[in-house]
Amino acid sequence: MNKNMTIGILAHVDAGKTTISEGILYIAGALRKMGRVDHRDTFLDNYDLERDRGITIFSKQAIFEYDGYHFTLLDTPGHADFSAEMERTLSVLDAAVLLISAPDGITGQTRTLWKLLKHYHVPTFIFVNKMDQYQGDKEDLLKEIKSSLSSNCIDFSSDFASPEFQEELAVCDEELLTSFLDGKEITNDQIKELISKRKCFPCAFGSALKMEGIESFLSLVASFAPVKKYDENGEFSAKVFKISRDTNGNRLTHIKITSGSLAPKTLLGDEKIDQIRFYSGEKYDTATKAVAGQICAVTGLSSALPGEMIGSSKALSAGSIMQPILSCSVLLPDGKDPIAFYKELKVLEEEDPTLQLSFNNKAQVIEIKVMGEVQKEVLKHIVKQRFGTEIDFGPGHIVYKETIANKVEGVGHFEPLRHYAEVHLLLEPAAPGSGISFATKCSTDKLSLNWQRLVLTHLQEKKHLGVLTGSEITDIKITLIAGKAHEKHTEGGDFRQATYRAVRQGLMSAKSVLLEPVLDYRLEIPADAVGRALTDMQRMNGTTSLPDIIGEKALITGTVPAACFLDYASELSSYTRGEGQIFTTFRGYEPCHNEEEVIESFRYDPELDLDNPSSSVFCSHGSSLIIPWDEAPEKMHVDSGLFPKERTAAVIEKEFVKYKNSEEELKAIFERTYGKIAPRYVETAVTYDSLNQADAPENDNRDYDLEAAKKEKHQNTASSIKNELNKEYLLVDGYNIIYASPELSDLAKTDLKAARDKLIDILINFQGFRREQVIVVFDAYKVAGGKEHTEEMSGLLIVYTKEAETADQYIEKAAHEISKKYKVTVATSDAIEQVIVLSSGAYRLSARDFWDEIKRTNILISESIASKTWK
């Protein structure tokens, strides 16, 4: 059985990529006659516009057999406008052929391709084409390749056994060098391993048009290309790298099978594979099976997108490097419905995800992202051919992005009547160029796994917009840290709303940073134009290297914001009289050089963006209450514990003043959400009649006073039940109660410990007169390494919480446990805590009512002392 190998040919535009593809297919016997680009009869460039312009626009594939290998050759676009199409094929390659035009040397696009090959870790062979047109020295050209790409680019046209060639290979790897110095010869298997690990890059030279060096290069690839091992017997998994449509409009999903095998009628999720096709140019053969290592196209899948894994694999794809930096509106003919046509155009986004089509509701226009002018021309042609509509494009503007500079917690609550969901997210800055990543660190005790998965789904299902300009966010890690669902009222859509609002609320809380696309440039200009070029770069907020003067030419490299560089090519041509050349590559997104100016030009108000709300929705008196983003955190029902609230005197006093909800209102809020409140202990009514079923002795021969027995049993049982029911607990939120008292509050401002001791004295007196067991709880969560501990003073229990636990949390747990058996009252003015303790079956006593009760008890104590009846 032949071994499967997928190779891709990559090059900058006009390097001869399609020509070498024709030559390889002809030598392998897959073509009887070679086509030529200038004759418009090439085997792979079969799209009308490709033949008219002489460039490759869409990646194509061809199949051929050579030297015991079953090759799939992928011919990729070379023009920079179609770099994204080319990049999508890199993840499915076993090896790549990088084509370099000898007369052009190492261009900016070649450097970009090299960066991409390194990013995707693709073993690479280099073919230097058009040597028949090159006037320089081959050795000088090889030195340029080594200095620009890698010193491990080695000319494989040398004698493999020569000491010079063996030494060049040896220096590519330390272990190999040690072995070489010991006198051991480097084997072909060792060379293969070097190539597979990208430690060696074989180079060959020739002319594709004249078929010089093509056959020897193909033999070189077949001899040394690393053949990946795929598990044909494992579970099926595959990588989607392209979506296209055949002449009948059928959707084709192009995949590389990475494990197992695939047959028609196979179910993948809810969809069934109809056909398996092996394409070679425009033609294809259907098959009954495809195995690991093969490239094929399947019909029947409607939802898989480029970059996704299908089947058993859950691996995540690497983020795309090539991204469009221009956005423009689509101009439609008069009378064309933009909304209906937008839905038709969305199909193009499946084939090229970088288009990122969107509809601007305010302006009622379709917006699209593109790489450049050539791509616009191609899109016009496709839309005319496929949809029968002639379109044009409005002026392009730069695509900005946003990120954050600090770590924040974003919260979202969605609770209209009979709905409920709450989500807490951690938003933190990520490495530049990393995009958006998602994770969960939420305990299943707080939020069940199915709800957590739903939140992650909602996070990934849309592009979230920033709050400075409404641009897409990037370089952020979003982690689910807490959440809450309702047993009866939560639906899936509730978590969508809460999740979106949590992201937005977090962005509103964070320090946002506007990012702009930045380009690496390479200027080749006459030496007398260096001064003008350096001045221009400084004016455009760019960076420059020291000019490298070579004869009458000068080379300048650096970086420049794309927004400043859009029309510079024509300006360069003007002042250099057509002799200057410029090469640019996308570097990435960096902080915007004129942030304030750009933000002002967008005039974006995040709070007026109704499609991306940052507020939360709560239930109040049976109707929805919208809480602004800056007030929402204080209203949340869940405390994630991520950023503990600083419970200083000012904070606690503010809380006391803010929350003055009545008992009835709190009870109403709770019952609307959870249902009617019922204490969890049962008060048993004991009456004398209930004892009439008391057992009498069966033997009436001895004396027995039935009435006396009933009376005694009644007294004993009633006394026992009364003692049990009389066990009551009063939980006091210490600092909350302190700041509810004007006297203690003033004392706390100067001496918090003194205020605490004063409260303890008051509670000791209160405890001594009342029947409740009083427990006062003080926060100690800020004490590093602190452990929970309890002290007893004259019957009063004093609890100090452990590190990272607030008094609220302790009281909530204690109320939940104790109320299972006894009556519990909680004294606090924290409205959220009051709602929670109500759910535990406990009673709530506001701080104001508590101090009134203290006063009333003190009066009773005084009266008891005066009458000498106090017991």
Image (spheres, rainbow, N blue to C red):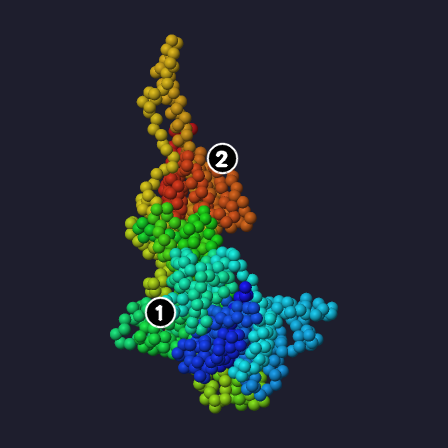
Mark 1–mark 2 contact, CB under 8 Å? no
Residue 229 sits above or below residue 666 on the image:
below
Residue 313 point in image, percent of width and height: 48, 58
User: Going by the image, does 53 lie left or right of 128?
Assistant: left
- Residue closest to the far right: 182
Tell me the residue at 36%/32% (across/down).
683
Q: CA distance from mark 1 to mark 2?
A: 90 Å
Q: Mark 2: few, some, or many residues within 10 Å (few <14, many ≥20)?
A: few
Disc 2 marks which residue?
A: 794
Q: Mark 1: few, some, or many residues within 10 Å (few <14, many ≥20)?
A: few
Tell me the residue at 39%/75% (across/down).
397
Tell me the residue at 60%/82% (across/down).
141
Q: Is residue 65 visible?
A: yes
Residue 749 point in image, percent of width and height: 46, 51
The amino acid sitting under disc 1 is Asn
In the picture, the disc for residue 444 is none
Residue 294 point in image, percent of width and height: 49, 65
Q: Is residue 513 visible?
A: no
